[in-house]
Amino acid sequence: MSKRIVFTGGSGKAGRHVVPYLLDRGHKVLNLDLVPLADSRVNTLLTDVTNSGEVFNALSMHFGFDGYETGKGPAPVDAVVHFAAVPRVLMRPDNTTFAANVTSTYNVIEAAVKLGIRKVIIASSETTYGVCFAEGDKDYHSFPLEEDYDIDPMDSYGLSKLVNEKTARAFAMRSGIDIYALRIGNVIEPHEYERFPGFFADPPSRKRNAWSYIDARDLGQIVDLCVAKDGLGFQVFNAVNDTITAHEPTQEFLAKWAPNTPLTRPMQGNEAPLSNRKIREVLGFKEEHDWRKYVPAEG
């Protein structure tokens, strides 16, 4: 069923793959970003999402010129997908990163709730698990990393995402709408599979990403599934692909490269340490872009 979706940050690394996926599924999308998205099927409204007034206005506008033909004003919005953010540490000063990410998320969710939009999907992050941007070599508490893990980031970016999850939970409890937070793994675009042989040659280099990833196109599927699934209230979902970025079986690999981290349950085959079991069981996610399709076989 076609939905009207406002997407923030659609011109970014993940968004420029997710927005076309949603368009291909028949949805209508308005992109809110500071730079245009190079896709003629979508209008980009240049919007500063740290400005509450701009967000309220943007979420209650026509998606394009065709909206004016109805004579009925802007049509209702079915869902908001909020990906806009300072995307990592070391791009802006730490206080700016934290403030921009926390304020923008509050603004987007507040505007959606007060405008009567019943579905919000926000981009959380693998960094909430505390290792990605940690000071020094930090071990995970346990594997697999699942959504009930005690997230404990020490950096400005990961901390902003932790706060955003709490903001989302508060608004969902207050309003009764659905707000789903996606803990997005290391996003891999199609051309980046050429990096995987280097990952295999240097396993410690992938510890900060928990030896896991999300294909940008499969992230599109996850967002589409979230748009379609109603009635879950506040939820957190790990947004990653099925398998570990290694040739060895997961338990064998982790015993060698993460020997100080216990397992809370047996890990089957090549299961990703950052587990996507919940999105498979609750949303019906079925990955289409296993890295093995794009990376030459070992040897």
Image (cartoon, rainbow, N blue to C red):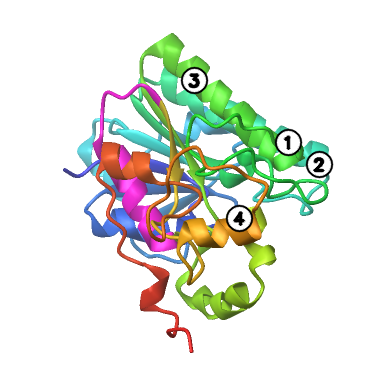
Question: What is the magenta segment's predominant secondary structure?
Answer: helix
Q: Gap in Å between the C-alphas at discs 2 and 4?
A: 21 Å
Determine whether the residue tagged by mark 4 lies in a helix, strand or loop. helix
Q: Gap in Å between the C-alphas at discs 1 and 3?
A: 18 Å
Q: Gap in Å between the C-alphas at discs 3 and 4?
A: 25 Å
Which mark is drawn over residue 147? none
In the rendered structure, which disc, 1 or 3, sits on the residue that comes first in sequence?
1
Residue underneath mark 3:
169
Which residue reaches farthest left? 1
Residue underneath mark 2:
94
Q: Which of 109 and 184 is in front in this view?
A: 184
Question: The magenta stretch spans which residues?
Answer: 216-234
Asked whether the beta carbons under mark 2 and mark 3 sit within 8 Å of each other, the answer is: no
Asked whether the beta carbons under mark 2 and mark 1 sit within 8 Å of each other, the answer is: yes
Q: At 79% across and 49% down in the image, what residue appears? A: 92
The spot of residue 21 in percent (x, y) is 32, 58
Determine whether the residue tagged by mark 3 lies in a helix, strand or loop. helix
In the rendered structure, which disc, 1 or 4, sits on the residue that comes first in sequence?
1
The spot of residue 74 in percent (x, y) is 32, 33
Q: Which of 40 and 79 is in front in this view?
A: 79
- Give above or below for 42 relative to 82: below
